[in-house]
Image (cartoon, helix red, strand yellow):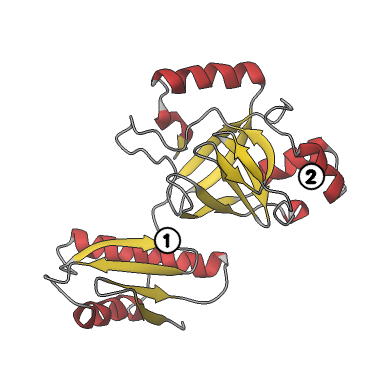
Amino acid sequence: MSVRYLSCGDTAFTVEFGNEISPRINGQVMALHAAIGAARAAGELTGVVETVPTMRSLMVSYDPLATSRADLQPEIEGLIAHGLPSETTTRRVAIPCCYDDPEFAPDLADVAERTGRTTEEVIEAHLKSAFTVYVLGFMPGLAYIAGLDAALYLPRRSDPRVRVPRSTVAIAMDMTTIYPFESPGGWHLIGRTPLWMFDQRREQPVFLAPGDHLSFERIDRPAFDRISAEVEAGTLDWSTLVKA
């Protein structure tokens, strides 16, 4: 395993596993993230404040009054040398999504035309994709979710939108995402979920996390409106979305 250690100022450094974005490299990142978390829970790695996973690296943030990179890096090298866990605890999350309302999926027909498929085939390909959350970024709660069916690979739009509605489901390249807020965006909009990816009323405001395995479940507009009302009222049982 080729690993590089790069400084990030005087309170953090990055453990970089490679230059490509792949399930293998992201798996190594998440395995080290989990191993450091377990070590901290056991009272080890004194001074580590947090670890932040990216698609191909892990940033280790530390308290410079309690430790240093010179002390921490050999300990992390030891974790890697002893072998990172091949199996880490992950969640399986089901996301309800409505593809049928043109307001929710303004790019669905265009995606179908550009990929040589019908709109139903595009929806089916999205539903059967084996998705994994790689990282969170760009804004609170926005997940970069890899694993899109290769039949749907498209570059980002050449004319990004100024406003994309909250909870819109979109695709680009080999990924899908869900916009947590209304914002600009250049991905292809193919559906919408009634869920909020960020809700400050929840104990954990951000719903998705790196390492989550994700699937989409198709719902119609009446189901969308019902779930949306529960989310708005704060009465939705979010635990029903997480599978064993």
Describe the element under mark 1 as helix, strand or loop. loop
Identity of the residue drawn at 20% across and 58% down: 41
Answer few, some or many: residues within 10 Å of disc 1's Cα (few below 14, many 20 plus, some between 14 and 19).
few
Q: Is residue 238 above or below residue 54?
A: above
Real-space Cα separation, disc 1 to disc 2, in angstroms = 36 Å
Q: Give the left or right position of residue 107, taking residue 28 as reference.
A: right
Q: Residue furthest left?
A: 65
| Residue type for callout 1 | Glu
Residue at mark 2: 111
Could you tell me which quadrant the C terminus lies in?
A: top left
Task: Residue type at mark 2: give it.
Answer: Val
The spot of residue 63 in percent (x, y) is 18, 67
Residue placed most toward the observer, 58 or 93 = 58
Residue under the image location 35 percent in, 33 percent down: 200
Comparing 82 with 148, the one in front is 148
Q: Residue at x 66, y 34 (%)?
A: 191
Disc number at residue 87?
1
Q: Where 159 sits versus 225, above or below?
A: below
